[in-house]
Image (cartoon, rainbow, N blue to C red):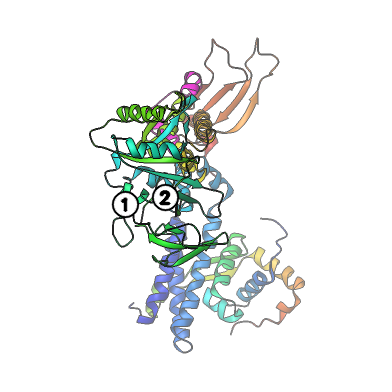
């Protein structure tokens, strides 16, 4: 993976949102206000770059709550470093609030 | 878990989009999107409902396209482009494109379909035959002589192309449509003197094709190139004579000295040879010399289909010219390679033939006959050159393909010294990307050695060719 990954503002926003604790696609959409056609391809790209990592929720837990299992995303260590650089580049990202 | 009714369309959209996702990723991709749709539905139920869900699901299409783009890496694209299937699919797409661009091959259909005349085999064109089998137009006075005295012709009419006008037009005699047995769009036959009231000037008549300016009816007026004409009749759909491009037929006989094309209906019991002899005698009796009295009669059906003979001749000549080099240049045969070569060459020749007929006006030019002595052989020679080109390319392409999987060979490497051919081998080596073998192409082919040498690679080489 290259040391220096330059993200677009949208990708950086999505990365910051995941870092703030929004963990699945629809959650990220709601937090950022971006359309689904932007968020999901961006998640694929960030995962491909190794900045985020996805894991499926346990089926048993989802079934107990009578809902489908979610695919959760979380920042990786390179993702955290890249996010720190992106925040310096896009200072407005600092205003993003964490998930409740 | 059962889904509510308003989830049906968004779910269908997601499933349809999933067809764009590479198969190995599809299941997980659909699972994630349907799970996300569940949460979107929970949220939307309280807000805008199905429209919002549809907007959400439309993102699946973007995501699927993105996945697809990601799937088609440069390596995968080049591997795909090397395959035999890609070659055949590209050529089939070219044939399909020609069919679409030409409006579903109207010229080709005209040539192959039955002619729209009553008793078509008895319809012939009559011309003065000159050197090099050229068909020449006939003076109007000769037509009048034949009309008065011929016993072998049932009827005789004249036609003359007027290609200089903005609309391709023909000037035909009054009995032209009656002779051919044409019908109007209302299904009525033309009488022999159907256009007796048509005179030059404001009452000049035209007969128009069914597809020319739809909506025009008999009796209405039509204008082009600054002149106005009365529409005497609209022809039935699909009528054409020699050139499908003629859309308007002006009614008017040729003058005595004017050169014109001649169409006739022969009596059933008369042969073309007998008719030619009789028409020649009539011309000599009318005072024309032997040279001017040479007459050629050609069936209209044979003349229309002569375009196929022309192309067939061109193809035959191309094969004859390229045949001597075939033995030296073709790789070793196997049934699969032979089938691929036949399909590829057939499609390539199909492309050239259809382009020739549909776009170069070759059919039209050939069928017009008697008006231009240069273009007919030119179209045949052009087709021959095209055929030679595609045959040559097809053989060269076959040479550069793997003998096992028929993929294009790649990774060309120059080996040896071109100046040291006496003692060493020099040439180019090409490799099958699947690791089936290697082709050695010598720099200079010598008569004592095979031009190309194929070396099969066994399984021990496979490690070098594993995909990343």
Residue at 33%, 78% (x, y): give it.
Answer: B2
Residues in magenta? B320-348
Residue at image mark 2 = B106
Q: Tag 1: Cα neighbours inside 10 Å, few (<14), some, or many (≥20)? A: some
User: Where residue B276 sits in the image (x, y, percent)?
Assistant: 35, 29
Nearer to us in this view, B68 or B372:
B372
Magenta stretch: dominant secondary structure: helix
Q: Nearer the viewer, mark 1 or mark 2?
A: 1
Residue B124's quadrant in the figure?
Answer: top left
B45 shown above or below B199 = below
Circle count:
2
Nearer to us in this view, B382 or B15:
B382
User: Where residue B239 sits in the image (x, y, percent)?
Assistant: 36, 52
Nearer to us in this view, B388 or B25:
B388
Residue at image mark 1 = B192
Whether residue B17 appears in this view of the structure is yes
């Amino acid at each position: 993976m290259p040391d220096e990954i330059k993200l677009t503002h949208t990708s950086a926003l999505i990365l910051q949102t995941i870092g703030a604790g929004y963990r699945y696609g629809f959650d990220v959409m709601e937090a950022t206000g971006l359309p689904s056609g932007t968020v999901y391809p961006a998640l694929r790209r960030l995962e491909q770059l190794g900045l985020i990592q996805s894991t499926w929720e346990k089926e048993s837990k989802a079934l107990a709550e009578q809902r489908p299992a979610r695919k959760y995303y979380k920042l990786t260590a390179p993702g955290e470093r890249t996010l720190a650089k992106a925040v310096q580049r896009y200072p407005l990202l600092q205003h993003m609030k964490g998930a409740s | 878990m059962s889904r509510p009714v308003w989830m049906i369309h968004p779910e269908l959209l997601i499933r349809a989009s999933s067809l764009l996702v590479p198969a190995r990723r599809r299941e997980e991709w659909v699972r994630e999107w349907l799970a996300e749709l569940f949460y979107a539905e929970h949220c939307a139920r309280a807000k805008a409902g199905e429209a919002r869900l549809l907007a959400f699901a439309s993102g699946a299409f973007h995501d699927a396209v993105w996945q697809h783009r990601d799937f088609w890496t440069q390596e995968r694209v080049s591997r795909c482009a090397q395959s035999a299937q890609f070659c055949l699919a590209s050529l089939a797409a070219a044939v399909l494109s020609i069919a679409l661009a030409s409006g579903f091959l109207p010229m080709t259909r005209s040539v192959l379909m039955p002619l729209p005349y009553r008793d078509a085999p008895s319809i012939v064109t009559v011309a003065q035959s000159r050197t090099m089998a050229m068909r020449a137009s006939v003076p109007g006075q000769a037509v009048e002589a034949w009309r008065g005295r011929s016993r072998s012709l049932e009827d005789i009419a004249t036609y003359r192309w007027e290609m200089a006008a903005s609309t391709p037009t023909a000037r035909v005699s009054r009995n032209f449509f009656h002779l051919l047995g044409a019908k109007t769009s209302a299904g009525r036959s033309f009488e022999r003197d159907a256009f007796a009231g048509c005179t030059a000037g404001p009452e000049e008549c035209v007969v128009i094709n069914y597809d020319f300016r739809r909506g025009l009816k008999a009796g209405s007026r039509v204008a082009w190139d600054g002149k106005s004409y009365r529409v005497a009749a609209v022809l039935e759909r699909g009528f054409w004579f020699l050139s499908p491009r003629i859309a308007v037929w002006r009614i008017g006989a040729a003058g005595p000295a004017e050169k014109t094309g001649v169409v006739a209906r022969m009596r059933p019991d008369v042969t073309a040879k007998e008719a030619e002899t009789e028409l020649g005698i009539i011309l000599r009796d009318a005072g024309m010399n032997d040279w001017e009295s040479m007459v050629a009669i050609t069936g209209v059906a044979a003349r229309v289909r002569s375009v196929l003979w022309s192309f067939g001749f061109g193809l035959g000549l191309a094969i004859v010219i390229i045949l001597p080099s075939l033995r030296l240049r073709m790789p070793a045969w196997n049934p699969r390679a032979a089938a691929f070569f036949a399909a590829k060459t057939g499609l390539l020749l199909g492309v050239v033939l259809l382009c020739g007929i549909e776009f170069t006006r070759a059919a039209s030019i050939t069928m017009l006959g008697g008006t231009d002595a240069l273009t007919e052989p030119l179209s045949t020679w052009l087709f021959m050159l095209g055929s030679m080109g595609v045959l040559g390319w097809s053989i060269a392409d076959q040479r550069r393909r793997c003998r096992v999987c028929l993929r294009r060979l790649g990774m060309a490497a120059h080996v040896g010294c071109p100046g040291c051919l006496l003692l060493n081998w020099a040439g180019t080596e090409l490799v099958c990307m699947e690791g089936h073998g290697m082709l050695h192409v010598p720099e200079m082919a010598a008569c004592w050695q095979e031009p190309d040498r194929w070396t099969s690679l066994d399984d021990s080489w496979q490690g070098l060719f594993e995909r990343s």
